[in-house]
Structure formats: structure tokens, C-alpha cells
Amino acid sequence: MHASKPGGGPRGSLLIVSSPSGAGKTTLCKRLRAEFPNIGFSVSYTTRKPRPGETDGVEYNFVSMERFQEMAARDEFAEYAMVHGNMYGTAANQVRDALVQGRDLLFDIDFQGGRQLRRHFPEEVVLVFILPPSLRELERRLRQRATDADEVIAQRLKVARSELAHYDEYDYLIVNEQLEPAYDALRAIYVASLHARPRQAARARALIDGQEALPW
Ligand code: 5GP
């Protein structure tokens, strides 16, 4: 699966942000979308049940296992994976549309999804991993935000450690000790990605070809 903008204009970035739960990824992503409203958000499909406050089509498209399997069989996912016992997947048409239109897309997906998208779109994908400053701090944040039992928190910490082990598959690692510097780093990575060579190469080629007024 490969797509670029017709006419060879600038391509969109596929900005993938992953982290163990409790590291602050959701807050950082919301802030980036608020500052840059042109970034689209890839709304995944999942078989998990909605949590209170979640709306179908906003945080996720909530579907049955049967429907998910049908979509997978029809090759309708750009990537999919099992995470914490539920299926999650990114619709291929969302990614294709963004690339064709030259729009940037933000993904909140795990390392398995990041790995698959990197394989499909090596030039467009930017992989960012958000790290907690320490496991002790991660535990403190998990306890603060959830009313989960001790065993659930212990299980989440165990999962967090195994997710952290995939740090070496990412382009950028941001330690989220303080929100402001962590956000500044994510913002800088996004802005830099807009100027990455694969994204801007078409402009250079147009200049060389003598096009005075670039068509985009
Ligand atoms: P939650 O159910 O708490 O919203 O998300 C659980 C985990 O699933 C998070 O780590 C999130 O990044 C990951 N996730 C969400 N959507 C997708 C997806 O479409 N693909 C993959 N591979 N992971 C996803």
C-alpha cells in the first residue's frame, strides 16, 4: 500500500505516538491537536467496550469481534494488533486519504502498530515514544488516576516494562517529567517533520524544473 499526493506536492507526515499507560501521551497529543488543528487524528477500530464518556466515532470506532475480523479479512486495516486482550486497528482508507491529500495524521497506537506502519510507509512515518521519568513515578500516576485494585496496578506496571523494552524501534524518545518541556519536544518533532526531505522533495524538483509559482 503506497500513496502520494497527485501532482507530486508535499506529502503528509504520519506521526505515531506510543507510551505505556500513565506516561501522559493523551494529554500531549490533545495539546498538539489543539495547537495544530490541521493535523488529523486517526480514529482506530477496537473490539473493547466504550468507557464512560467515550463516544463511538470520536475516541474509537467500537465494533464487534465479528466485524473486526471481517475488516481484517478484507484487508481494510493498514495495521492491527491485540493490545491488553482487545483488538485495535487503523483503517487503511484513513491513511490513504491523508497521504493522497497531503494531510498530517496523528496516531495513538502501540509499538506493534507503529512497526507495521513503518514497514508500509517508511518515508512518511515518524515514531515517537513517551517515557515516564521512572517506574515509581508511573506507579504514582496510575494510582492517582485510577481506582484500580493493587493487582491491576501491578499488572499495568508489568505491561509498561515490556512496552518500554521496545524503545529502540522509535525515532524519538521523550521523557515526560514535566508537561511543558515534554510538549515543546513533541511540537519540535512535529514541526521538523514538516520539513523532512521526503516531504519537501517535490518542491525542490519543481524549482529545478523552473516552475516559478509552485502549485501548492
Ligand atoms: P485504550 O484501550 O486504553 O484506549 O488503548 C490501549 C492501547 O491500545 C494504547 O496503548 C493505544 O495506543 C493502543 N491502540 C489504540 N488504537 C490502536 C490501533 O489502532 N492499533 C494499535 N496497534 N494499537 C492501538
Image: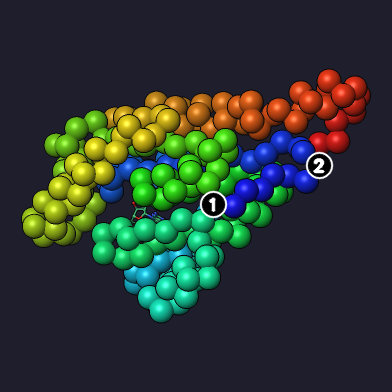
Q: Secondary structure at mark 2?
A: helix
Amino acid carrying mark 1 in the image: Phe
Determine the CA span between mark 1 and mark 2. 25 Å
Q: Residue at x 32, y 60 (%)?
A: 82
> Is the CB–ligand 1 distance for label 1 below 8 Å?
no
Query: Percent x, y for residue 13?
Result: 59, 39
Q: Which residue is mark 1?
A: 41
Query: Percent x, y for residue 41?
Result: 54, 52
Q: Which residue is mark 2?
A: 7
Amino acid carrying mark 2 in the image: Gly
Query: Which label sits on residue 198?
Result: none
Question: From the viewer's perspective, is residue 134 above or below residue 27?
Answer: above
Q: Name the side, left or right, on which 199 lies relative to 166.
A: right
Q: Nearer the viewer, residue 190 or 64?
A: 64
Crowding at mark 1 (Cα within 10 Å: few <14, some 14-19, many 20+):
many
Q: Nearer the viewer, residue 15 or 93?
A: 93
Q: Name which quarter of the figure residue 27 lies in.
A: top left
Q: Nearer the viewer, residue 46 or 176?
A: 46
